[in-house]
Image (cartoon, rainbow, N blue to C red):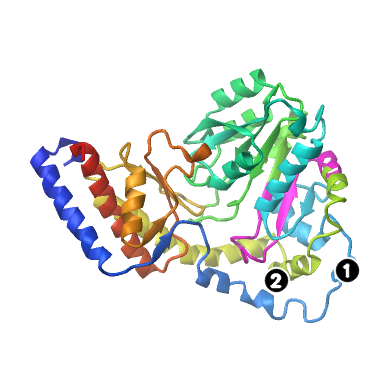
Amino acid sequence: MNIKQLSKTQLEELYSKESAILEEYKKKGLKLDMSRGKPSPEQLDLSNDMLTHCLDGDHISETGVDCRNYGVLDGIYEAKRLFMPMMGVGRYEIIIGGNSSLQLMYDTIARAMLLGVKGSPKPWSKCERVKWLCPAPGYDRHFAICQAFGIEMITVPMLSDGPDMDMVERLVSEDGDIKGIWCVPRYANPTGVVYSDEVVRRFANLSPKAPDFRIYWDDAYCVHDLTDERAEILNILEECKKTGKQDMPVIFASTSKISFPGGGIAAIGASEENIEFMKQQMSFQIIGYDKLNQLRHARFFKDFNGILEHMKKHRAILKPKFDLVVSTLDRELSDLGIGSWSNPKGGYFVSFDGLNGTAKRIVALCKDVGVKLTEAGAAFPYGVDPRDSNIRIAPSYPSLEELEAAINIFCTAAKVAACEVLLGK
C-alpha cells in the first residue's frame, strides 16, 4: 500500500519497525561511502599496465617531440588523436591539458573573468553583473566554480531530454548579463539524462543577447555506458557551425574515470578560432602540460577504439552495482510510493527523489549509522533544493557487499524519514 494511504497507527508501526532496524545497523560500526563518483580500486587496476612498460625509456613522440622537455602547449598529436573522435573535434580544435577537466573549466572561467573571451566587450569581472544558467539537478562542482567567482546562478529545470530549452532560449535572448550555461549532455550528473537531438539543435540556434555567451559542454561521461547500446548525441560544435555560432560551445572531457582520476589527461575543444584565442591567453600561464603522461595514455590505449574496449571492462564492474541499487530501491520503496529514481544507461550516479522534506533527514540518518552520502541539495545552485527531496547516489566505489548494506540502510532511512514527515514528527 502507498505510504500516504496508511493510517496513523500503521505509520507508527512502520516507523517503529524501521527505526529499530537502523539502530541495529548502528551497532555494527559501519563505514560505507556512496558520496562521490570515485572509481573503485578494481577499476583503477584496469590501467595499471600504463605504469610499467608504456614508455620503456622511449620518450619521443611520433612527430619527433621530446616529451621530457618544454613546449607543445596544446598537446602532442597522439593524445589529440585519442580525444578527437571522443569529443567530436578536429586536430586544430583541441588542447590537451593536465589531469583534470575540472581545472580546465575553472581556468577557462578565471581567464574569462580576468581577460574576457573571444568577442567579449570587456572582461567579465568588469561587468556590473555576471549570471550563469544552471540546469538542476546538476553537478555540484560546476556550481561551486560559479560561486567561487561570485557569478549569479539561475536554476533551469532538467527535463527528461535535457534542460528546459523554452526557459533557456527566453532567458539568454533577454538578459545580456547571462554569459553561459553548464551542460553534461550525455548521462547527465546525477540524473543520467541524454540530451535529445532537438535539445542540441536548439542550443546551436540560441540567439544570446550577450555577444560572449558560452555553452560549457562537459562531456564527462561520453564513453561511460552501462549497456551494450551507446547513447549517441548530435555533435554540438558541428551543429553550431551550421548556424554560424561555432564560438558558443566549449567542450571538456578527460580520462579521469577511464584511466586514473589522479593521473589522467583532460582536454578542451572549441572552434579553431576559439582555440587560438585560448592558447594566446594560456601562453602566459603554462609552457606545456605533462607530455610524458600524454604519451603514456596514447601508447596504452592506441586509439579511440582502444578506449571503447577498455570501457567494456569498466562496465563489467559497474553494471552489477547499478543493478543492485536500482533493484533494491524497486523492491523496498516502489510499493510504498516513497519517491522515484533514475535507472541510467550510463554515467556514475542514480538520482533519487524522495518525499518532499525528506532528503536532508535521509542523509543525516544514514550518516548516523555509518553511510556517507553526498549532502542533500548538492545538485542545486547554492546547495538549496527547494523541495528537499533529491539525493545523488554513487554506487561505483564500494564493493558489492558494502553496497548491498549501504543501499539497504538508505531504503530504511527513506522509510523512517517519510513516516516522520507524514506523522509530523
Q: Position of residue 19 (x, y in %)?
A: 20, 54
Q: Is residue 294 magenta?
A: no
Q: Which mark is residue 230?
A: none
Q: Residue at x 62, y 39 (%)?
A: 146
Q: Residue at x 73, y 49 (%)?
A: 268
Q: Residue furthest left?
A: 9
In terms of image quadrants, where is residue 320? bottom left
Q: Is residue 65 left or right of residue 147?
A: right
Q: Is residue 128 above or below residue 287?
A: above
Q: Residue at x 64, y 24 (%)?
A: 172
* Residue pointed to by mark 1: 69
* Helix, strand or loop for disc 2: helix
Q: Residue at x 85, y 69 (%)?
A: 67
Identify the image quadrant of the N terminus: top left
Q: Nearer the viewer, residue 48 or 230?
A: 48
In terms of image quadrants, where is residue 181? top right
Residue type at tag 1: Asn
Residue type at tag 2: Phe
Q: Position of residue 205 (x, y in %)?
A: 68, 26
Q: Earlier in the sequence, mark 1 or mark 2?
A: 1
Work out whether residue 185 can be spotted. Answer: no
Identify the image quadrant of the C terminus: top left
Q: Is residue 144 left or right of residue 9?
A: right
